[in-house]
Amino acid sequence: MRVAIVIDIINAIFEFIFNVLNGALDPILTQLAEIGFREPVVQFMLINAILGLSIYMTLNCGLFSLANAGFMAVGAYVSVILTQKYDAEFGLSLLGGALAAGLVAIPIGLPVLRLRSVYLAIATIGFGEIVRIVVLNVDTIATDLFNPDEPIELTFGARGISRIPKLTETAHLVFFLILMGYLLYRMQRSRFGRAMTAIRQDEKVATTLGINVVYYKNMAFILGAMIAGVAGGFSGHATRIITPKDYGFDKAVDILAYAVLGGLGHWSGPIIGGMALKAIPERLRYLNEYTGALTGAVLLLIIIYLPSGLVSLGQPSFWRRGGRFEGARRLAGIGVALIVLTNMLPLRNLGSDEVLLGLEYWHLWGLGAGVGLIYWITSRQPASTGGRFSLPMSAVTGLLALGLIIAGLIGRIDQPGDGYYVLVFGLLLATAAGVIPYAPQHTETPPAEQVEGSHA
Amino acid sequence: MDINVPQQLVNALWLGGLYSLFALGYALIFSVLGLLNLSHSAVFACGAFVGLYTACGDEVFTTTCTELDRPIWIVIPAAMIGAGIVSVAVDRVAFWPLRKRNAPRMNQLISSIGAAALLVNLLQIQFGAAQQRFPFGSIPNDPVSGLPVVITPIQITALVIALGLMFALRILVKRTRLGREMRTVAFNERVASLLGVNVDRTYMTAFFIAGALAGAAGMMYGLAFNSMTPFMGESVSLKGLTVIVLGGLGSIEGAVIGGFLIAAIEVFSVALGRSDIRDAFVFLLLFVILVVRPRGLLGQGVEDRA
């Protein structure tokens, strides 16, 4: 009786929160839909953000773990089975998924977290694959073991579970993300968070400071697993079908890419990175078969140009480091490369009315020319450290960028079939642009950001 | 349950040869640079397609290959050279800029993923996502007669080439000046450069050799199954990782033994009738090895290397 009242009250509170959130989200979602991000896409961006947070938990503690896809699978399967077979409430099924993932993480974490760097990464990849294979075969094995007469059907093997009720709403995701963001923000300033940071920076020193390294590492691992479990539950109820191959090696690596792309310096990095890695291919979808290639190229470019991830754009030190124009030059490098790539590639199957981010072609060419000029001019400024790059090579790069843009303006490359060569050419250019100004001639002192071994 | 043990051993041998060859590239890069090159499987696929293009000509861009322009044996050297060049290009594009800046290893891992995605998608744009094959009859696929086991000439060739390349690599690393330079760089980059080793060139050489090995493995994999897709690397990428972990990260002999061991486990678990859980065996083994003996079967301890 009393329990029922408590549940009613909790439900009412959540309903109120989601109503308010829905009201706030509606205009934003309409705006996003207008520029091409419809609600399902937004939902997956948010789920990616949660996944990014889950790997941030472990990376923040110096653990290079790739187990999150496996935990996501555990969470997804458990919560989907709970809602589908046992008609559990969505919130409860998510909690169940998270708890299951956390419980699995305890026996895995205890032996595995002794490993370091690449060894830990590979062991956790192995764990992810084992989860995938178990999910794939649990039906046949259970049937063989317990009940040979009547087949047990729990995960449906490779076919996966289909016709899952679509319960995930954008408001749920936003609420969870805000909650997690707040908790992480608080955590970073707490004893718990500082202990983790200390472990990441130097495990031995952390031990001498009286930090129980094993405890904190396992806590980080378990918390990361639980967040991944929730993300799995959300994604299962958003895609409405889950199969074991959704949670393989590729997914594990994708999740790592969210965190690294966004940047590990700040908890918002993985959120931004996760959303960006969903948004970029979506934004480039009109390129058809070039989408995958370009997404790979974008990932490469961001890693090369923004070594500390997308969040470093928001840090003042990024704009000041290495002379006045350093930040501007890096951005310009990315800008030129992206604009060249996105606009020259798809010409063979693009109508003239296709636009990118609401801009028409000639806008983009103009922008490209402008950015190229900025790049060229700024790269001629000697950096404050003195003589870090050779002037002629930078000038050559700048001229190449300009030449490419002019060629695009004249339309010489607009001929069908040339897109591919332009892609290669643009990539070479981008590489040159990234490499030449950065080849330091003095290598006596490694930069302070070198944290080899600590979390790599 | 009776299984034909000699036959399964033969199957495990030639498959193991390919796995080892592929994993050697991983191991080489890991020992010299200390990083996992996840684009290695994409280079593997590139090798197969370079070979296919060399033998068949422009036909492969539009349709499937119907007749060979050049003799079939040319595909293997072509694949090795092509994949080696691709591998060096990957180094220049994805690793070099980061290495110059002393970026964390994790960033280099991610950039290799970017490079892999780029390569696989470029292959798909160029050759299409559908399966490509050599024309029927152009590959000697009839089993060799007069033997107690079934083995095709192409499988024998694959095994012989794999063993030959492994042997050559061993001599290269242990006996030549180049190998000494590579081992010095692997030990410590700065010490190597103080001793007058051209570190950058050594990296490029290592990438070329690793790529060439992957290309040879990819081409022979494509020939043995007569099937090539841009995504063919995915099936071996994780196995290659398992192999080098099993053998000991960065250990060349370990990669060879690990390759044969993994192939044997796979072949025998299929023969025993549980093909559905054969990968589970492999990864369970991987997991146990990592927990019990992280340095792998033949690897040196992490402390010894430092």
Image: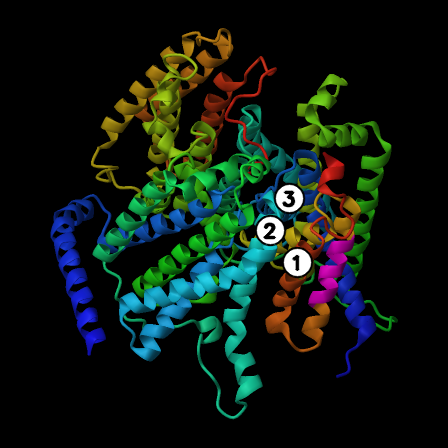
Magenta segment main secondary structure = helix
- Looking at the picture, which amino acid does disc 3 mark? Thr
Q: Secondary structure at mark 1?
A: helix
- Residue A255 in the image: x percent, y percent? 44, 49
Which residue matches tag 3? B54
Q: Write down the chain letter for disc 1.
A: B
Magenta-colored span:
B257-266
Residue depicted at x 56% and y 64%: A130
Lower sequence index among marks 3 and 1: 3
- B187 relative position to A320: left or right: right
- Looking at the picture, which amino acid does disc 1 mark? Leu
Which residue matches tag 1? B286
Q: Nearer the viewer, mark 2 or mark 3?
A: 2
Q: Is residue A141 above or below residue B139?
A: below
Q: Residues within 10 Å of mark 2 (few under 14, many from 20)?
A: many
Q: Nearer the viewer, residue B45 or A15?
A: A15
Whether residue B263 appears in magenta in the rendering, the answer is yes
Which residue matches tag 2? A122
Q: Nearer the viewer, residue B44 or B66?
A: B44
Q: Nearer the viewer, residue A308 or B19?
A: A308
Q: How is the image coloured?
A: rainbow
- Residue A183 in the image: x percent, y percent? 32, 47
